[in-house]
Image (spheres, grey):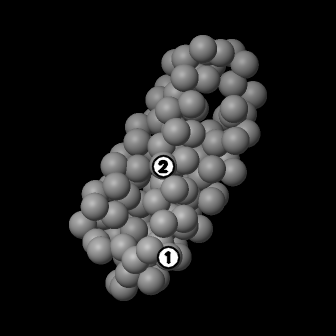
Amino acid sequence: MDHSHKIAYDELKSMYDELQSYLDSVMLDPEDEPLLLQCEQLGDQIYAYNAAILKKNSVTLAKGQGSVKELINQAKGAKVALKKAEDKVKILAQVANAIDKLLSQLAKFL
């Protein structure tokens, strides 16, 4: 696996783990269910990204190095947003936005 793809995967997994930890620690309302589903979709996409990298190897995906760097930056940004947010509504909105960006970026690799 290409080094930058490993960094991207590690960063995505770390962000996802922090997100899961946060969601496990707060009481979500029924209207927050779409966020939980979105988070599950993100976990599935992270797994699919890793599988695609391993299957296709970095030869095919080397063309997308800029996209990988953007993916890493978005994952880091999502973690920062999660740590900086002060209230639940703000956190959930920022998390949903960050997940949307990550899903869009991951779709480029799958």
Seen as rendered, the residue at the extreme left is 25
Question: Can residue 69 be seen?
Answer: no
Seen as rendered, the residue at the extreme front is 30
Q: Is residue 89 or residue 27 the one in the foreground? A: 27
For image coordinates 51% across by 56% down, the residue present is: 37
Q: Is residue 103 or residue 14 the one in the foreground? A: 103
Position of 65 with respect to 40 (left or right) is right
Q: Is residue 32 or residue 58 the one in the foreground? A: 32
Compared to residue 39, the image places residue 55 above or below, namely above
Compared to residue 35, the image places residue 15 above or below, namely above
Q: How many neighbours does mark 1 have within 10 angstroms: few (below 14), some (14-19), or many (20 or more)?
A: few
For image coordinates 40% across by 52% down, the residue present is: 15
Q: Amino acid at mark 1?
A: Glu
For image coordinates 73% across by 39% down, the residue present is: 108
Q: Is residue 75 or residue 93 the one in the foreground? A: 93
Identify the residue position indicated by label 2 in the image.
Answer: 40
Q: Are marks 1 and 2 in contact (CB under 8 Å)?
A: no
Identify the residue position indicated by label 1 in the image.
Answer: 31
